[in-house]
Image (spheres, helix red, strand yellow):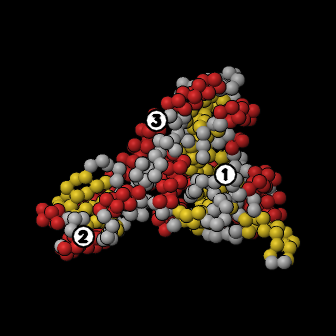
């Protein structure tokens, strides 16, 4: 397998296939989620569904096909998605009276439903979520991170006023940050997107941005305050307490299977996947080693350990295949098994096993009597340790000293010579589309977000040298 430092993207492509997370589909830009890959998504779904239930937000499902007329009702929305929309125009030999788009997002479909369902202030807030597939015909694809069809959740809410809607928008962003950091051990940068990076049709878009090991950014989640734009387009009105019909304020928000790509690129190493136990499909793998087939007591002991771990809800595998120990070690490292337990004749005789944690260098001897407690402790400690490690790496790749375009270009050249990530760069920005476009044109860097917590204020615009209106993060991105 190619080394990370030599070609990070190729390392990623080889890892996701060799670890059996995905396979390529016959349809360009689409992938097949293999069971180990889909299970990662299932654990994310389970975790986020806990939050939804605690907030009283219920899951629903809406049709994948959306009439063209729905998109035409909100001009910014259709303009934003037009280049990526696949259309259904005929069925068999019959041309459809109206083209139907394959869902890129569901604001229009859900807006139409909300207009029927919401009548009074007593109906608000109206809050739903759906887990679905969506289509955006990407020209340049990368498994999990950018595909023509992908999986996501999209939440849609309607509220009595701006204050309530904005509160939900930011509350969701906070939950996305918690999901990434505490559950996936991916540190993120919270902030507001610039107008040019705003979701099509939104008043304000907020994002969490993640830094990969190669210093590139991934937009890991977004939450949008839509104002009354979609309410006006789809007649989402309600009778308020003053007995007047007014438009509701709406929000939408989503995270997708891009989180899986982020997870792999944040934690993986030269041996393959490194996954936090919170989400890993294989938390513990038990392996008989040595001439174990001649000693049935070894398998009896491992069966006993397996049953005990299974009872505790730990995701455990028992690898009693005929492959060599070295092959098994490499295979389970590649697949990101969190803990490997080895037991051979001598281990059995001495009353212990050899335990190896995926992200730690050394094996340790653990007595049978202490094994279950040790496994539980190691699983509990691994996710926070991975987060701390990722945060430390991010800090090394944050750059605050760059104040001009020439300095940014020099930084890029210096990183190229030293074979180092260009990382996240904090700059001053005058707030104009022209300077934002110039940065991208000259360097390939894009604006990530205007951070809520600014590490330091930047006084001048990177391009013009004029006073800055905002301090923001820029980076090269996937």
Q: Where is residue 124, by image quadrant? A: bottom right
Q: For the residues labelled 2 and 1, say whether their Cβ atoms are less than 8 Å apart.
A: no
> At which x and y percent is residue 129?
61, 63
| Side of 96 where 243 appears, left or right | left
Eyeballing the image, is 62 above or below 173?
below
Looking at this view, is 402 or 299 the one in front? 299
User: Is residue 472 shown to the viewer in this render?
Assistant: yes
As helix, strand or loop, the secondary structure at mark 2 comes to helix
As helix, strand or loop, the secondary structure at mark 1 comes to loop
Q: Residue at x 45, y 34 (%)?
A: 396
Query: Label 3, on which residue?
Result: 395
The residue at the far top in this view is: 465
Circle number at residue 233: none
Mark 1 vs mark 3, foreground winner is: 1
Query: Label 2, on which residue?
Result: 302
> At which x and y percent is residue 248?
72, 57
Q: Where is residue 56, by image quadrant? A: bottom right
Circle number at residue 140: 1
Q: For the residues labelled 1 and 3, say whether their Cβ atoms are less than 8 Å apart.
A: no
| Side of 72 where 187 appears, left or right | left
> At which x and y percent is residue 14?
50, 55
The tag earlier along the polypeptide, 3 or 2, is 2
> At which x and y percent is residue 214?
51, 41
The tag earlier along the polypeptide, 1 or 3, is 1
């Amino acid at each position: 397998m190619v080394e990370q430092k030599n070609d990070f993207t190729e390392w990623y492509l080889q890892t996701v296939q060799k670890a059996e997370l995905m396979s390529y589909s016959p349809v360009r830009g689409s992938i097949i989620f293999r069971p180990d890959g889909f299970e990662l998504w299932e654990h994310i779904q389970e975790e986020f569904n806990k939050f939804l239930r605690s907030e009283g937000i219920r899951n629903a499902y809406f049709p994948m096909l959306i009439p063209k007329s729905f998109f035409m009702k909100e001009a910014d929305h259709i303009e934003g998605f037009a280049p990526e929309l696949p259309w259904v125009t005929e069925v068999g030999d019959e041309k459809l009276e109206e083209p139907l788009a394959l869902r890129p997002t569901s604001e229009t479909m859900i807006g139409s439903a909300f207009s029927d369902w919401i009548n009074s202030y007593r109906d608000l807030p109206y809050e739903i979520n759906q887990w679905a597939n969506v289509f955006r015909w990407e020209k340049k694809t990368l498994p999990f991170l950018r595909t023509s069809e992908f999986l996501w959740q999209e939440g849609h809410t309607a509220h009595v006023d701006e204050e309530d809607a904005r509160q939900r928008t930011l509350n969701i962003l906070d939950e996305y940050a918690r999901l990434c950091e505490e559950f996936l051990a991916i540190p993120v940068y919270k902030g507001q997107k610039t107008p040019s990076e705003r979701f099509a049709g939104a008043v304000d878009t907020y994002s969490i941005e993640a830094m990969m090991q190669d210093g590139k950014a991934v937009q890991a989640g977004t939450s949008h305050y839509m104002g009354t734009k979609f309410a006006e387009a789809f007649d989402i009105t309600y009778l308020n307490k003053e007995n007047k019909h007014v438009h509701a304020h709406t929000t939408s928000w989503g995270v997708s299977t891009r989180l899986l790509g982020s997870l792999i690129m944040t934690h993986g190493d030269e041996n393959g996947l490194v996954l936090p136990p919170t989400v890993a499909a294989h938390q513990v793998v038990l392996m008989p080693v040595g001439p174990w087939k001649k000693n049935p007591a070894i398998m009896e002991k491992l069966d006993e350990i397996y049953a005990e771990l299974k009872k505790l809800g730990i995701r455990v595998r028992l690898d009693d295949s005929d492959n060599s120990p070295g092959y098994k070690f490499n295979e389970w490292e590649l697949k990101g098994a969190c803990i490997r337990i080895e037991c051979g004749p001598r281990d059995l005789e001495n009353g212990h096993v050899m335990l190896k944690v995926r992200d730690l260098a050394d094996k340790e001897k653990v007595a049978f009597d202490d094994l279950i407690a040790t496994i539980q402790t190691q699983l509990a400690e691994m996710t926070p340790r991975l987060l701390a490690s990722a945060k430390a790496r991010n800090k090394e790749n944050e750059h605050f000293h760059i104040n001009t375009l020439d300095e940014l270009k020099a930084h890029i050249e210096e990183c190229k010579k030293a074979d180092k990530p260009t990382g996240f760069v904090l700059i001053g920005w005058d707030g104009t589309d022209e300077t934002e476009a110039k940065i991208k044109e000259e360097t390939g860097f894009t604006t990530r977000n205007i951070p809520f917590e600014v590490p330091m204020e930047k006084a001048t615009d990177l391009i013009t040298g004029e006073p800055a209106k905002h301090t923001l993060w820029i980076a090269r991105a996937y």
